């Protein structure tokens, strides 16, 4: 993916922009970067304009040594759309990318032509979850990103992927190890304080597709069902043989769902 850069809200934000047609904006998971969407960009850019962003704190974008919120990440996305002259797009947010999509929709619903919420949840963190974020930030600080990779990989990928697909494991590990500690800690703080988006769900009025890996333990199918029940008209697709990173573990199935949904939005 060739890299482009924009100066946004005091930071350098890296992104890729490939293809023409309906813009599809992809928001990645924690603690990864925009290269997790490589197979989506490859397959879908023949029909759509694919924009992938390194969210603040990740990949080639700046990682601020300062507290930030997911609302600020949403503001970065809006500023990038403005920079590119894009008024409306279809957004695809996976996990933390989905949390940012909720923040974006709360502030800028008019920019959202449709949403794909993948392997994510609407609920805020529990008290225990927030404690876990604090512990993980301390681990990042004392032991570095490779310790975060050790913790996260079993949460992100299925046991079968970990045992039999070393190339995927290595790709995820190198994305995590490429992060700066301030980005990992900044995200953990931002996710810990995100609001509950369950009350937002009945107010979502754009076409919405929900995707979840059947083996996802981080944001299980029960979380996807809750979103599907409460968002008017939302559809739900469950991908067999995938855990949390369903786009990496089962890219063909994931791409097919995205392409079908995006094609309908173009009609
Ligand atoms: C992610 O994949 O973005 C994270 O698992 C989200 C989270 O920790 O809540």
Image (cartoon, rainbow, N blue to C red):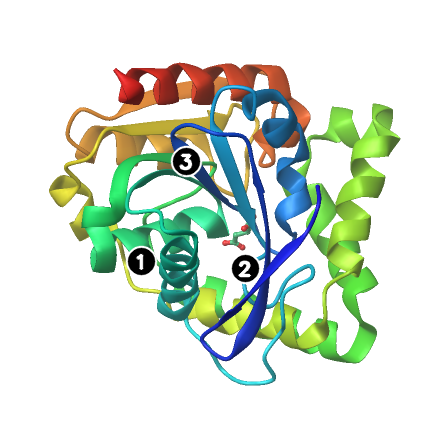
Of mark 2 and mark 1, the one earlier in the sequence is 2
The quadrant in which the N terminus is found is top right
Can residue 241 be seen at all in this image of the molecule?
no
Residue visible at 43% across and 27% down?
Answer: 211
Q: Which mark is residue 82?
A: none
| Nearer the observer, 118 or 51 | 51
**Residue picked out by circle 1:** 103
**Residue picked out by circle 3:** 23
What is the x, y in percent for residue 177? 80, 59
State how far apart marks 3 and 2 are (Cα). Answer: 17 Å
Asked whether, in this view, residue 178 is left or right of residue 211, the answer is right
Q: Say which quarter of the image contains residue 62.
A: bottom right
Q: How crowded is mark 2: few (under 14 residues within 10 Å), some or many (20 or more)?
A: many
The total number of labels drawn is 3
Foreground: disc 1 or disc 3 = 3
Residue visible at 48% across and 29% down?
Answer: 20
Q: In this view, does 96 lie above or below 219?
A: below
State how far apart marks 2 and 1 are (Cα). Answer: 14 Å
Q: Residue 55 carries which label?
A: 2
Q: How crowded is mark 1: few (under 14 residues within 10 Å), some or many (20 or more)?
A: many
Foreground: disc 2 or disc 1 = 2
Element at label 2: loop
Q: Does the residue labelled 2 lie within 8 Å of ligand 1?
A: no
Can residue 192 be seen at all in this image of the molecule?
yes
What is the x, y in percent for residue 153? 73, 45
């Amino acid at each position: 993916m060739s890299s482009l850069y924009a100066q946004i809200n005091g930071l350098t934000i890296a992104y890729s922009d490939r293809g023409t047609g309906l813009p599809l904006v992809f928001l990645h998971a924690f603690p990864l970067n925009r290269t997790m969407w490589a197979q989506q960009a490859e397959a879908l850019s023949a029909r759509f304009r694919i924009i992938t962003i390194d969210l603040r704190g990740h990949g080639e974008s700046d990682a601020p040594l300062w507290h930030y919120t997911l609302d600020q990440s949403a503001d970065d996305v809006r500023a990038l759309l403005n920079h590119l002259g894009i008024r409306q797009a279809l957004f695809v947010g996976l996990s933390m990318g989905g949390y940012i999509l909720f923040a974006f929709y709360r502030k800028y619903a008019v920019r959202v032509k449709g949403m794909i919420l993948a392997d994510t949840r609407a609920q805020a963190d529990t008290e225990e979850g927030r404690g876990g974020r604090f512990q993980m930030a301390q681990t990042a600080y004392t032991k570095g990103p490779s310790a975060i990779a050790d913790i996260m990989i079993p949460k992100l990928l299925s046991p079968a992927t970990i045992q039999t697909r070393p190339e995927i494991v290595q790709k995820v590990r190198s994305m995590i190890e490429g992060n700066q500690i301030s980005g990992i800690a900044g995200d953990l703080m931002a996710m810990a304080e995100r609001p509950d988006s369950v009350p937002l769900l009945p107010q979502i009025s754009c076409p919405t597709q929900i995707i979840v890996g059947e083996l996802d333990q981080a944001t299980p199918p029960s979380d996807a069902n809750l979103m599907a029940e409460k968002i008017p008209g939302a559809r739900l697709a469950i991908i067999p043989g995938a855990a949390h990173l369903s786009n990496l573990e089962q890219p063909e199935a994931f791409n097919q769902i995205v392409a079908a949904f995006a094609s309908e939005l173009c009609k």
